[in-house]
Image (cartoon, rainbow, N blue to C red):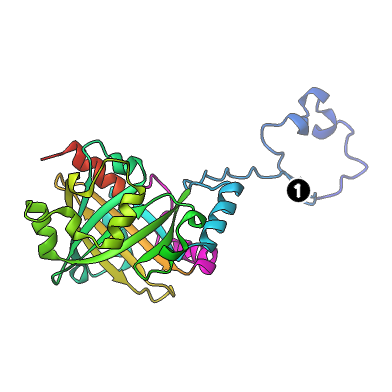
């Protein structure tokens, strides 16, 4: 900037400017432009608002309870259900081969009013490709300390903590084996339902089912046809399981899960979340428990 000479008239444009024409910096809508040779005024830029996360958050109390339950569980399963609009993209991002998925059928048994489910009891049988099947009597939620210690020593019995965005549930499962034909015979009415389960399973059911509701009085709800695929990602140390549940009306549920040991629960949850993020899979949205969804569907669609 050129220094004014002493011979320049005192009534220069700058000097002659009325006081009212000077823009006060404190009320300016736009920051004043700095002139050459002068320091620029430091006007802080407004920060962009961070979008609110769709991921449900657990309270400190919930985290403490989940941690306590994890220490008393046999295994931990981390689960995430994907909205229907994201099914195709999710399968592609996980690089799954659908031809490798194993077909299954899941049959549930309850009263027409879902009295068992309301009491926290689930009775299920599955047909699995290859002729073998399995059964389970499940109780949830449970307090592990209140379960029979002798029962916990059984290889067929396990306590599992399911963790999903915004929630968790601890369940006790008594598993058994059967054949595909036996499941079909029960569904056709050619075999009593009680014969599908072991003596230990029947005792577990009688100890926790509502009084007066026997296994042989239950009705069949289902089956749900499903595809189950196991996947070992290159950038994730744990195996990943993907299940697609297909309902007769064309609706679907897609669930991604992984398992870990109780002492690895929170580390595994962080690693699983990071893996899903790398795959571009959002964590959040409404979670659809598979069992409840199946029961609700077949009660609403009895035929």
Task: Tell me what residue is drawn at x 23 percent, y 60 percent.
Answer: 197
Residue 186: x %, y % from top left: 12, 55
Task: Tell me what residue is drawn at x 50 percent, y 66 percent.
Answer: 262
In which image quadrant can residue 297 be found? Answer: top left
Residue 36: x %, y % from top left: 76, 50
37 vs 275: above or below: above
Q: In which quarter of the image is the C terminus?
A: top left
* Residue 290 in sight: no
Instruction: Assess disc 1: are there few (<14), some (14-19) or many (≥20) residues with their C-alpha within 10 Å of its C-alpha.
Output: few
Task: Tell me what residue is drawn at x 58 percent, y 44 percent.
Answer: 48
Q: Start and end of the magenta stretch?
A: 262-290
Number of labels in the image equals 1
In which image quadrant can residue 196 be found? Answer: bottom left
In the structure shown, which secondary structural element does the residue marked by tag 1 occupy?
A: loop
Q: Is residue 23 left or right of residue 5?
A: left
Query: Which residue is more in the foreground, 20 or 4?
Result: 20
Q: Is residue 170 left or right of residue 247?
A: right
Q: Mark 1 points at which residue?
A: 40
Residue 6: x %, y % from top left: 93, 42
Residue 200: x %, y % from top left: 31, 62
Query: Which residue is more in the foreground, 257 or 34?
Result: 257
């Amino acid at each position: 900037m050129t220094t004014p000479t002493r011979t320049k008239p005192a009534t220069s444009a700058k000097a002659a400017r009325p006081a009212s024409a000077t823009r006060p910096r404190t009320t300016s809508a736009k920051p004043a432009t700095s002139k050459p040779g002068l320091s620029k005024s430091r006007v802080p830029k407004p920060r962009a608002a961070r979008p609110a996360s769709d991921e449900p958050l657990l309270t400190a109390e919930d985290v403490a309870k989940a941690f306590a339950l994890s220490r008393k569980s046999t295994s931990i399963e981390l689960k995430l259900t994907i909205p229907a609009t994201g099914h195709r993209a999710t399968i592609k991002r996980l690089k799954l081969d659908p031809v490798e998925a194993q077909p299954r059928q899941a049959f549930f048994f309850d009263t027409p009013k879902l009295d068992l489910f309301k009491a926290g009891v689930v009775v299920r049988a599955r047909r699995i490709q290859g002729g073998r099947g399995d059964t389970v009597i499940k109780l949830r939620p449970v307090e592990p300390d209140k379960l029979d210690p002798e029962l916990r020593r059984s290889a067929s019995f396990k306590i599992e903590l399911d963790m999903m965005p915004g929630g968790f549930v601890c369940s006790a499962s008594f598993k058994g084996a059967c054949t595909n034909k036996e499941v079909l015979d029960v569904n056709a009415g050619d075999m009593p339902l009680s014969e599908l389960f072991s003596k230990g399973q029947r005792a577990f059911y009688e100890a926790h089912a509502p009084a007066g509701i026997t296994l042989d009085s239950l009705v069949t709800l289902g089956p749900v046809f499903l595809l189950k695929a196991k996947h070992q990602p290159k950038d994730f140390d744990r195996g990943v399981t993907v299940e697609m549940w297909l309902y007769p009306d064309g609706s679907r549920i897609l669930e991604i899960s992984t398992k870990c040991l109780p002492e690895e629960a929170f580390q595994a949850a962080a690693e699983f979340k990071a893996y899903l993020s790398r795959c571009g899979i959002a964590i959040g949205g409404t979670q659809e428990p598979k069992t409840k969804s199946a029961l609700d569907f077949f009660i609403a669609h009895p035929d």
